[in-house]
Structure formats: structure tokens, C-alpha cells
Image (cartoon, grey):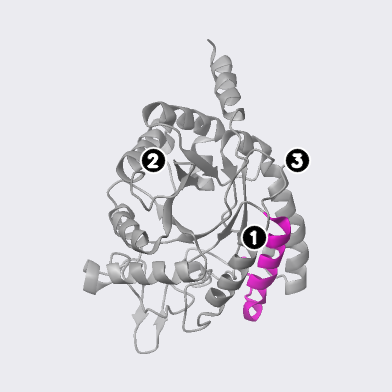
């Protein structure tokens, strides 16, 4: 069989996959890369911390919990308790490499999540050496190591994994098609949600999404955001099509101006006193996807967090409770 024949055979198998009875979920992107001297012996990701002034050099806002450590079980339990209380079903955990700081923290989050009925999956961030064999090795490692944990997110009993756009770009969609097939041979069926809003990605992955739309929402006022979201969200659901899992991503705002490696002009999306979050949620409900993704729970460097802060309190957290209830009360999306 030629390589082209093999590719067509793989694609034909993926096109047989049909997701038509998908429970509505609200998921938030989650970062477990923070550390402080009390727990981890040094600072991780928090830089130039001034406890008296409540400022952090690498963070736009100040967390209500302070510059915490992602390996602190009490912090993880607080996060899971808060998330569950506002209707967030699960966290999409930023995951990078086998045995690194994130990987070591994942079991702690899974155990905390299990106490509160919160699901956890991973955001597959990068492929070592741009090598599809390495992508496969990482995927199989994750499945073997974590997918049987009771808190791991599953759909019809199959573990879910989210794949970030960088990792897709590093080896390409065709190689991810190969990884999915080989992972199924080695481990069994899993559910892959790809960060690529394209018809081709919708053929290969079980669902599609985008991580952060701030490149298009930057500088817009609430009414402009409403018009943008009404068009884009409906389009994203249509691209996913009737047999795939359709996701819509909402943000409370975005501000990464404190990061030194990112030069102006930056794609800053103003919060508009909470109105940005509100109008994006409204448009998400109109589009009626399968899953609503929130960017983010705690990406403090980019100022997209809904976790309570000194500057915004729990405003977005309270709003999440209202909107998640409305979303889950909607009928299943039409699959024509």
C-alpha cells in the first residue's frame, strides 16, 4: 500500500467517527506552573513579587490567594471547590514534558479534582523535536499514566485530550492523524480535540476549538464584541459540523503587557467592567455549541484569568455561575 493509500485509509476511518450525543460542558484552561519558596523551594513563573504592594512583575493582576504554589494541595482544592461551585465541569491542564514541573503537579490536581467532582484533561502544548514518534510517545505516556484516574475527563468512557495549535503546527495535521491511529492501536480509543478551526482539522480530530481569540477581539467595545462573536461562534460550530464536538471559547479579557518578550502593540482585550465576558457568554449561548471553553482559569501572565483577583474580585466567577446554568439548560445543538 502506498503512503497516499495509507493516508486515505486512515482518514476514512476517522470519518466514520460520529459524535452526536455530547453532554454540554463548561471547561476552563488551567495552569499548574506556579511555585513559591514555601512549597517548591523557589519561585516558578511568579517574578518580582512584592507582597506589601501586592504586585507581581510577571502578572497583570494580583491573585486573591496570593502568589500560590501549584503543588500546594490546599490551593488545588480551593480551585476545584470554586470551579465546581460556579458550574465549571473541568480543567484543561497545560502539559509540556514527561517529568517536568507540570507533570509532577498533575497527579495532585487529579486527586483534588476527584474530591469535588471536577474533571481534568490536558492541553498538549508541544512536540519534542517536531517528531511524530515523540508526539505518540507523549500521548501514550499520558494515557497509560493518568487516563484511568477517576477524575480524568472522559466521553462515553473514552479519555479526552486537547491538542494546542503549536503542537499541531510542529508536526502538521497529517502526522496527527497518524498519531491518533497509532495511539488507538497501542492504548485504545481516545477523544482528541484540536486547536484548529478548519474543515480538515474537523475531519481528523474528534472536535475542534481555538485557545484564545484576543487577536480578533482586541480593541473592540462591547457592541463590537457582540457582533464579532455572533458571526464567529456560529461559524466555528458550522466548521465542526454535525459529527464532531463543537467548542466556543470565551475570555473575560486579555492583557499581557507585563511580559518582556512580547513587544507592543499587544492584542489587549479590555474587560469593560465585566461586559466583555457577559456579551461573549450571550453569543456563546446563541451559537449553542457542545462545550464552552473559558480562557482562562488562571493564566495570570496574560491577564485572562477568572480566578478571583485583587483588581476584579470574584466578578467573573459569579457571572460564570449564572451563564453556565443557562448554557446547560439549552437543548442539544442541532446536527443537520
Q: Nearer the viewer, residue 70 or 185?
A: 185
Residue 91, image x and y in percent? 45, 58
- Answer few, some or many: residues within 10 Å of disc 1's Cα (few below 14, many 20 plus, some between 14 and 19): few
Between the residue at mark 2 and the residue at mark 3, the CA separation in whole angstroms equals: 39 Å
- Answer few, some or many: residues within 10 Å of disc 3's Cα (few below 14, many 20 plus, some between 14 and 19): few
**Pointers 2 and 3 in contact (C-beta within 8 Å):** no
Query: Residue sitting at 57 percent across and 70 percent down?
Result: 320
- Answer few, some or many: residues within 10 Å of disc 2's Cα (few below 14, many 20 plus, some between 14 and 19): some
Residue 213, image x and y in percent? 63, 59
**Pointers 1 and 2 in contact (C-beta within 8 Å):** no
Say whether disc 1 or disc 2 marks the residue closer to the N-terminus.
2
Magenta region: 266-288
Note whether residue 300 is visible.
no
Answer left or right for 76 relative to 205. left
Whether residue 278 appears in magenta in the rendering, the answer is yes
Say whether disc 1 or disc 3 marks the residue closer to the N-terminus.
1
Mark 2 element type: helix
Mark 1 vs mark 3: in front:
3
Mark 2 vs mark 3: in front:
3
Residue 115, image x and y in percent? 34, 62
Q: Quadrant of residue 197?
A: top right
Disc number placed over residue 215 in the picture, else none: 1
How many discs appear?
Answer: 3
Between the residue at mark 1 and the residue at mark 2, the CA separation in whole angstroms equals: 27 Å
Residue 204, image x and y in percent? 58, 34
Residue for badge 3: 336
Whether residue 255 appears in magenta in the rendering, the answer is no
- Residue 34, relative to residue 234: is it above or below? below
- Residue 128, relative to residue 257: is it above or below? above
Say whether disc 2 or disc 3 marks the residue closer to the N-terminus.
2
Residue for badge 2: 128
Amino acid at each position: 500500500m502506498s503512503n497516499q493509500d495509507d493516508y486515505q485509509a486512515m482518514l476514512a476511518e476517522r470519518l466514520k467517527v460520529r459524535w452526536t450525543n455530547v453532554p454540554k460542558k463548561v471547561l476552563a484552561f488551567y495552569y499548574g506552573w506556579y511555585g513559591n519558596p514555601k512549597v517548591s523551594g523557589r519561585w516558578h513563573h511568579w517574578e518580582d513579587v512584592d507582597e506589601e504592594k501586592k504586585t507581581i512583575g510577571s502578572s497583570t493582576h494580583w491573585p486573591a490567594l496570593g502568589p500560590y504554589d501549584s503543588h500546594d494541595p490546599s490551593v488545588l482544592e480551593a480551585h476545584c471547590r470554586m470551579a465546581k461551585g460556579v458550574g465549571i465541569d473541568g480543567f484543561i491542564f497545560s502539559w509540556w514534558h514527561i517529568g517536568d514541573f507540570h507533570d509532577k503537579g498533575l497527579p495532585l490536581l487529579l486527586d483534588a479534582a476527584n474530591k469535588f467532582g471536577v474533571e481534568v484533561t490536558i492541553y498538549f502544548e508541544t512536540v519534542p523535536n517536531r517528531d511524530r514518534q515523540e508526539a505518540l510517545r507523549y500521548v501514550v505516556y499520558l494515557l497509560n499514566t493518568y487516563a484511568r484516574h477517576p477524575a480524568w475527563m472522559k466521553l462515553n468512557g473514552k479519555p479526552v485530550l486537547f491538542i494546542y495549535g503549536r503542537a499541531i503546527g510542529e508536526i502538521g495535521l497529517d502526522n496527527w492523524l497518524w498519531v491518533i491511529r497509532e495511539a488507538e492501536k497501542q492504548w485504545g480509543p481516545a477523544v482528541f480535540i484540536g486547536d484548529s478551526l478548519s474543515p480538515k482539522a474537523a475531519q481528523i480530530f474528534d472536535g475542534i476549538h481555538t485557545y484564545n481569540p484576543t487577536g480578533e477581539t482586541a480593541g473592540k467595545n462591547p457592541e463590537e464584541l457582540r457582533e464579532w462573536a455572533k458571526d464567529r461562534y456560529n461559524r466555528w460550530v458550522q466548521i465542526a459540523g454535525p459529527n464532531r464536538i463543537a467548542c466556543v471559547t470565551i475570555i473575560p479579557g486579555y492583557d499581557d503587557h507585563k511580559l518582556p518578550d512580547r513587544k507592543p502593540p499587544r492584542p489587549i482585550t479590555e474587560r469593560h467592567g465585566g461586559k466583555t465576558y457577559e456579551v461573549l457568554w450571550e453569543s456563546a449561548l446563541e451559537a449553542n455549541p457542545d462545550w464552552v471553553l473559558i480562557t482562562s482559569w488562571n493564566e495570570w501572565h496574560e491577564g485572562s484569568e477568572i480566578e478571583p483577583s485583587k483588581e476584579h474580585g470574584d466578578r467573573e466567577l459569579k457571572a460564570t455561575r449564572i451563564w453556565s446554568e443557562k448554557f446547560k439548560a439549552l437543548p442539544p445543538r442541532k446536527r443537520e
